[in-house]
Amino acid sequence: MPRTRPELEQLERQTLAPYAQMSGDSRGRKHKEAASPWRTEYQRDRDRVIHSRAFRRLEYKTQVFLNGTGDHLRTRLTHTIEVAAIARGIARALRLNEDLTETIALAHDLGHSPFGHRGEQVLDRLMKGHGGFEHNRQSLRVVEVLEQKYAAFSGLNLTWEVREGLVKHFTAYDHPGRRAGFAARQASLEAQVANLADEITYYSHDLDDGLDAGLLSEAELNRHVVVWQETARRVRKEQGSLSGEPRRNAIIRALIDAQVRDVVATSEKLIAAAGVQSADDVRLYRTALVQYSPARRRQNQEMRKFLYRHLYFSQRVDEANTRAVRMLETVFNFYLRHPKEIGEQSRRRIRREGLHRAVCDYVAGMTDRYIMREYQRHFGLNCLAPLT
């Protein structure tokens, strides 16, 4: 006999910590639906995210390097999968709800613009006076409005707890959202885990991509980044003298492991000291309870400064991103003048939400390669040539 949803919910109550978010205690969905016979509410949400169009488009959106510039470089999709894997591991260690944690992690970048954070900044500037643009709020908009998979409602009709995790998602790159209906001080511990898993992932894997692309060097990291020095020394002591790629991979694996261990140990102590006994106790607590230790936070800040100086604002990345965002701005303004050129669903929202928001939704949903094609189609220019 298959295991039923009530049995899975009971298993959660038997095995998870009391302050975990139980799927049986979900505040539900905006549009009422019959429960699944053998999936919990959060398992159902995870499947809806994975089967969405917005999730598939992440394959062709920039993480750091423009999509298509290297076969082994990360895209927004591979970044998302890595965040979900790390988040699930931390949630398991802390006896939290793995399904909810994974779902928030898988959905956290659904609203990201083409061309990474530079694209996001340009869209926010173009939307000044029209509500702005921020990818966390856009992720919520994707799952509540923009996905069109069901006849009965717009969006994916995800549970309140997943949507809470999206509106309150923020890392060093991001800013927490503000939205009526999500007024608690904190999000669930599961959402807090997804936040830090995102940070762990981009620090470690942007390092990996930067080294792979030749924009970073181990010599520079050894000179300027204490946590890299210490980790490299530990790897050498434990595994002996390694060469090239195996050494680099061993160091990055050790960096990820050390960060995960730090988050689990620190968070366990903070949760115990807070004395929270339920998921709602967590929401009412004065500070986040899933955190790095102060020492690890300082080390990460040093690494972040190094990455900004030597990777994100390096000449190669910056020039390519500058060309890309000029292209984005040109296409955005073209659609404002020629609204019939945007997709049918976006056109239908013009009367209700305004031309700027309709254009923004359309452009934000584009992949890197699609906006390049649109640029070439309308202007007949080589989108990769330097812009003067």
Image (tube, rainbow, N blue to C red):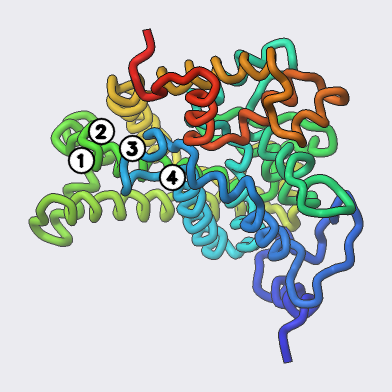
Category of crowding for the residue at label 4, using alpha-carbon neighbours closer than 10 angstroms: few (below 14), some (14–19), many (at least 20): many
Three-letter residue code for mark 3 = Thr
Q: Residues within 10 Å of mark 3 (few under 14, many from 20)?
A: few
Quadrant containing the N terminus is bottom right
Q: Position of residue 170 (x, y in %)?
A: 59, 35
Quarter where residue 279 is shown: bottom right
- Sequence-wise, which precedes: disc 3 or disc 2? 3
In-image side of 200 versus 12 (left or right): left
Q: Is residue 236 above or below residue 299?
A: below
**288 or 363: nearer the eye?**
363
CA distance for labels 2 and 4: 16 Å
Looking at numbered disc 2 in the image, what kind of residue is underneath it? Answer: Val
Disc number lying in front (3 or 4):
3
The residue indicated by pointer 2 is: 225
In terms of depth relative to the viewer, which is nearer, 253 or 296? 253
Q: As rendered, which of 169 and 64 lies closer to the eye?
A: 64
> Label 4, on which residue?
200
Q: Quick check: 51 left or right of 223?
A: right
Which circle's residue, 1 or 3, is located before the other in the chain? 3
Residue at position x 63%, y 50% from top? 104
Q: Secondary structure at mark 3?
A: loop
